[in-house]
Amino acid sequence: MSGSPDSRVADEGRLDVEQISGTAEAEPRRGGPGEGPGDGRGDAAAPGGPGGPGGGPAEGVWRFPVPAAEASVPRTRHAVRDRLLAQGMAGVRYQELVDDLLLIVSELVSNAVTHAAELSPEVVTELSVRGGWVRVSVEDGDPYRPKALENDTGRTGGRGLLLVKSVTLQAGGVCDVERTGEGGKVIWASLPVPPEPDR
């Protein structure tokens, strides 16, 4: 690839998106409780169009690799939004979930671009929809594992992970930071899909 480090996102076109469905790259990742929220890269997920069985979103796993550049933040957010909508998460039932996920993606990609770009020229966002949960994760090559900051009313910056944690917990989800096999880190959040309304 030629051009600037963020040439993949500088184009008017879409991000490169990889759909994962049961390849060796889709091995389970440690994470949240049970089979739901933390294992977003587990068994092969059924690719799908709008809506899955039972009226819920169609399942699948997608990766969005981008350069660690500021332009990657809105591009990744838009790509994740488009994928969520394509999986059937449109309408009032999913609005809060989609808004929360997009805020989380924006904060995590922004943190990776701001703090890890020197050691990680590429940032990979992964989206997994399965088992009644939606999991987003952002992976970079920087080994530093940040911790959510305590509330400090005098501080004006550095609240991204605290915001991610707060939004995740309010939604009934879980989040964590883990090391990768390559020595970097992955920060993930899993949120439950709202139940189908009673008829």
Image (cartoon, rainbow, N blue to C red):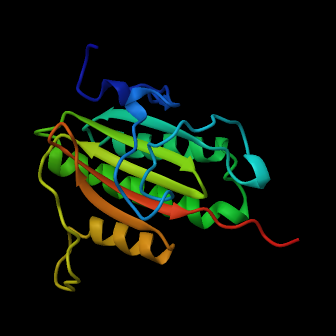
> 72 above or below 99?
above
Quarter of the rendering containing residue 141:
top left
Q: Position of residue 190 (x, y in %)?
A: 46, 60
For the N terminus, give its image quadrant: top left
> 12 above or below 144?
above
Work out which residue is located at the far top of the displayed protein and give it: 2
> 197 above or below 71?
below
In this rendered view, identify the residue nearer to me: 45 or 123.
45
Q: Where is residue 70 in the image (x, y as percent from the top left)?
A: 28, 43
For the C terminus, give its image quadrant: bottom right
Q: Position of residue 47 (x, y in %)?
A: 63, 34
Quarter of the rendering containing residue 63:
top left
Residue at position x 25%, y 17% from top?
3
Residue at position x 47%, y 53% from top?
135
Q: Where is residue 49 in the image (x, y as percent from the top left)?
A: 71, 36
141 on left or right of 26:
left
- Count how many numbered circles sit on residues in the image: 0
Residue at position x 12%, y 53% from top?
144
Work out which residue is located at the far bottom of the displayed protein and give it: 153
141 on left or right of 82:
left
Residue at position x 41%, y 25% from top?
11
Work out which residue is located at the far front of the displayed protein and give it: 34
